[in-house]
Amino acid sequence: MTGLRHLLSAADLDHAGAIAVLDTAAQMAATQSREIKKLPTLRGRTVVNLFFEDSTRTRISFEAAAKRLSADVINFSAKGSSVSKGESLKDTALTLQAMGADAVVIRHHASGAPHRLAHAGWVDAAVVNAGDGTHQHPTQALLDAFTLRRHLAGGSDNPDGVGLDLAGTHVAIVGDVLHSRVARSNVLLLHTLGARVTLVAPPTLVPVGVEAWPCAVSYDLDGVITDQQPDAVMMLRVQRERMGAGGGAASGATSFFPSPLEYTRTFGLDARRLRMLPDHAIVLHPGPMNRGLEISADAADSDRSVIVEQVSNGVAVRMAVLYLLLAGEREGWS
Ligand code: NCD
């Protein structure tokens, strides 16, 4: 099996490759409970965080992951550049190449930008997609799978679920699927890991062509919760910044649903819906949350919520990805 050079999509990982990342992440997580969290593994290597779009937790998480592996980290916040997209990306890439970047972690508003960076021949670095447009966000899906595996597949003798997949697990992914790279990456990775996925959204927020995705689709959240008793509910942020014709943060949402109140009533997770879930079910959200819109404060802060744990698992998963791309044993990567 050839080694993976880049991580651009959840589709880059086959079953063995996905398990290899999750198992490596479990090893990384174990090192993160030590007093000294830093490992010497990537000493002398340079990781560039190239963020053309806003991010809090993903950027900080990649930075923490690279630093805990002793890599040198350069944070490049490219937002606001007035150069046209293609030129800007190429010129930036040539600069990174001249600086000797070993890995480039890129977030870009244009779907496909990481793919272009990886394959245009501008850089020799390994490219990690940290979210491109509405397309893919593979490390988010990996951290979600890591979190699901810990809670739903592991037992007391194997708390991280090492070696296990998610066969038999049913995950409902709820909300703004249309604009969500998190949903796209999760559907692919969860399917690879043997889980069953149901997307739940208003018809206006379901992408054209969803029939070809390896999942079920429903417009009825109460029905899915009551009749199918999912093991996990993953709430998606209503991405208002991608809804307006002009992209304005507050505009446009009401062309996708009648009103915020109506959206919350039909597709929001609240205490009543939490009580309808099976006792073992957990609640995920990639953040940032619109509290009071897709998730109520009591659902976000309930003891079923693993939202804060997702953030710490993100560091371990990104350590694993950087390690496997830059230093590690690549056997098992597709
Ligand atoms: C997600 C993203 O940026 O795609 N957030 C994240 O990476 N933590 C989801 C979102 O912004 O809603």
Image (spheres, helix red, strand yellow):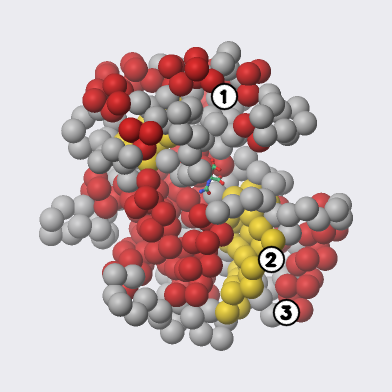
Q: CA distance from mark 1 to mark 3?
A: 42 Å
Amino acid type, mark 1: Leu
Q: Earlier in the sequence, mark 2 or mark 1?
A: 2
Percent of width and height locating residue 332: 41, 64
Q: Secondary structure at mark 2?
A: strand
Percent of width and height locating residue 83: 86, 55
Amino acid type, mark 3: Met
Percent of width and height locating residue 16: 38, 58
Q: Which residue is mark 1?
A: 205
Q: Earlier in the sequence, mark 1 or mark 3?
A: 3
At 40% across and 79% down in the image, what residue appears? 38
Q: Which residue is mark 2?
A: 76
Q: CA distance from mark 2 to mark 1?
A: 33 Å
Q: Neighbour class for label 3 at 10 Å: few (<14), some, many (≥20)?
A: few
Q: Please tell me in which quarter of the rendered image ligand 1 is found.
A: top right
22 with respect to 51 (left or right): left
Q: Secondary structure at mark 3?
A: loop
At 56% across and 16% down in the image, what residue appears? 259
Residue 234 is drawn in which quadrant?
A: top left
Q: Secondary structure at mark 1?
A: helix
Q: CA distance from mark 2 to mark 3?
A: 12 Å
Q: Would you say the beta carbon of the disc 2 residue lies within 8 angstroms of ligand 1?
A: no
Q: Neighbour class for label 1 at 10 Å: few (<14), some, many (≥20)?
A: some
Q: Which residue is mark 3?
A: 99
At 82% across and 59% down in the image, what residue appears? 88
Q: Neighbour class for label 2 at 10 Å: few (<14), some, many (≥20)?
A: some
Amino acid type, mark 2: Phe
